[in-house]
Amino acid sequence: MIDPTQSALNAATTTAPAGFQRIVVGVDFSESSSHALTTARSRFPGATLRLVHVTDARVTAAPDLMGGVTAAMPDPTLLHTLEDADAARMQGVAQAGEETELMVGDPVTGLLEAAGRWEADLIVVGTHAQGALEHFFLGSTAEKVVARSPIPVLTVRRRTGSGRE
């Protein structure tokens, strides 16, 4: 059986196929995100890249006794500080010709909404190594994007010397 994701990726190693001209890359400033961006730049030459970062509004949530989180009123000062810091970091990541978008909210929802509004052909996201407990409670942002996205998603895992992510 042919893996359509791998076929699309192989086809994209020379030039961006007609279907992948508008690519959203999720940026969270991690090493995995940086590797995904590098991969998108090298595998899809000629495509227009839009780097999207969503400042996670859940930073103001507090843990509750049942193992979840209780929503708190967003602290506007904290969110503005985070937005300003993220905007400065994004300027250092984006290259000439690349578009950027900064949002505040849930990273999965924000990334999907940005891709939809921009009419992206592909979303590229990095994956992070997580412990089993963290994965059980939080899940993977990349997994959630794949599960909810109406357009193709390429997940990129960064290899390290240990063989894990």
Image (tube, grey):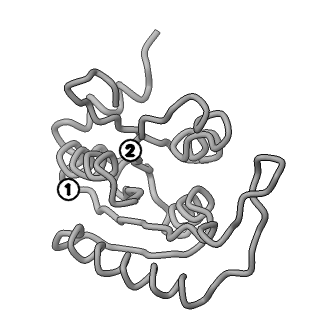
x, y percent for residue 143 = 56, 38
x, y percent for residue 103 = 51, 75
Residue beneath label 2, please? Answer: 126
Label located before the other in sequence (2 or 1): 1
Q: Amino acid at mark 2?
A: Gly
Foreground mark, 2 or 1? 2
Q: Amino acid at mark 1?
A: Gly
Looking at the image, which residue sits at the far top? 1
Return the residue nearer the eye: 91 or 67.
67
Residue beneath label 1, please? Answer: 46
Looking at the image, which residue sits at the far bottom? 77
Name the residue located 50 percent from the left edge and 68 percent from the top edge: 54
Which class describes the residues within 10 Å of circle 2: few (<14), some (14-19), or many (20+)?
many
Name the residue located 55 percent from the left edge and 90 percent from the top edge: 77
x, y percent for residue 119 = 50, 63
| Quadrant in the picture for the C terminus | top left
Looking at the image, which residue sits at the far right? 66
Quarter of the figure with residue 136: top right
Name the secondary structure under disc 1: loop
Name the secondary structure under disc 2: strand
Left or right of 148, for residue 45: left
Name the residue located 45 percent from the left edge and 81 percent from the top edge: 83
Residue at mark 2 to residue at mark 1: CA–CA distance: 21 Å
Quarter of the figure with residue 133: top right
Return the residue nearer the eye: 162 or 31.
162
Quarter of the figure with residue 144: top right
Left or right of 144, for residue 152: left
Return the residue nearer the eye: 49 or 109.
109
Name the residue located 65 percent from the left edge and 46 percent from the top edge: 148
Circles 2 and 1, Cβ within 8 Å, touching? The answer is: no
In the rendering, which numbered label is found on residue 163?
none
x, y percent for residue 121 = 44, 52
